[in-house]
Image (tube, rainbow, N blue to C red):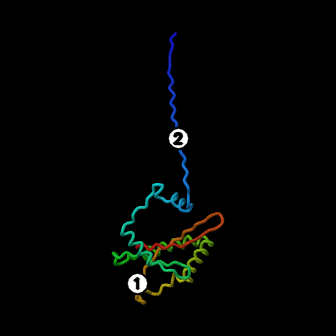
Amino acid sequence: MSSTSSTAIFASITRVLTVTTADITDINEHLRCVWELENIGITAKKSSTKAHVLLEEFQSKVKYRDGRSEVSLPWNDQVEELNNIKGNAERRLRSLTERVIKNRMFMRDYDTKIREYFVNGFAEKLVNSAEAGISVYYMQQQEVVQQDRRTKNLRVVFDSSS
């Protein structure tokens, strides 16, 4: 009979938690320091000069009227002429019309939203642009529906990219 031997080694590491207290004279200042992002290792990126100029330009174009904000569409100064997307806009409108006709409630809701744009001055009836001597840009549109258990919110979204 053979005998076997084994050795067991047990190691113990003790961790110590030290708690210190400090007199806090201004609790608001202390809470502000606790929640400052820099104190937890997060620092804000420095914004570039270009981004800062763009932000200032955007903010200068925001106007407030009757409790609503009005912002002009962003404009690329390097583009001298917009693409003519009238055909694309008409195709998307035909597709939308086909979907709307199949669902009376959706048709009613969409019609209501478009009429609200006219009433609120966000849209206007197109006159014959050639006769009026004005430039016209057709924006494609589509619906965005957010629906939860109790409510359904329909918005009409316009695509102004050219």
- Which x, y percent locates residue 84? 39, 77
- Which x, y percent locates residue 56? 41, 74
Q: Secondary structure at mark 2?
A: loop
User: Camera-side residue: 50 or 10?
Assistant: 10
Which callout, 2 or 1, points at the residue further toward the start of the chain?
2
Residue to which mark 2 is pinned: 16
- Residue 115 circle label: none
- The correct choice, above or below, for 14 with respect to 99 in the image is above
Structural crowding at the residue carrying mark 2, measured as other residues with C-alpha within 10 Å and reported as few (<14), some (14–19) or many (≥20): few
Residue 135 location, quadrant: bottom left
- Which x, y percent locates residue 3? 51, 13
Residue to which mark 1 is pinned: 135
Count of marks, rendered view: 2
User: Camera-side residue: 60 or 119?
Assistant: 60
Please tell me which residue is depicted at 55% across the width and 47% down the height of the picture.
19
- What amino acid is found at the position of numbered circle 1 in the picture? Ser
Please tell me which residue is depicted at 42% across the width and 82% down the height of the picture.
136
Please tell me which residue is depicted at 36% across the width and 69% down the height of the picture.
49
- Which x, y percent locates residue 108? 61, 75
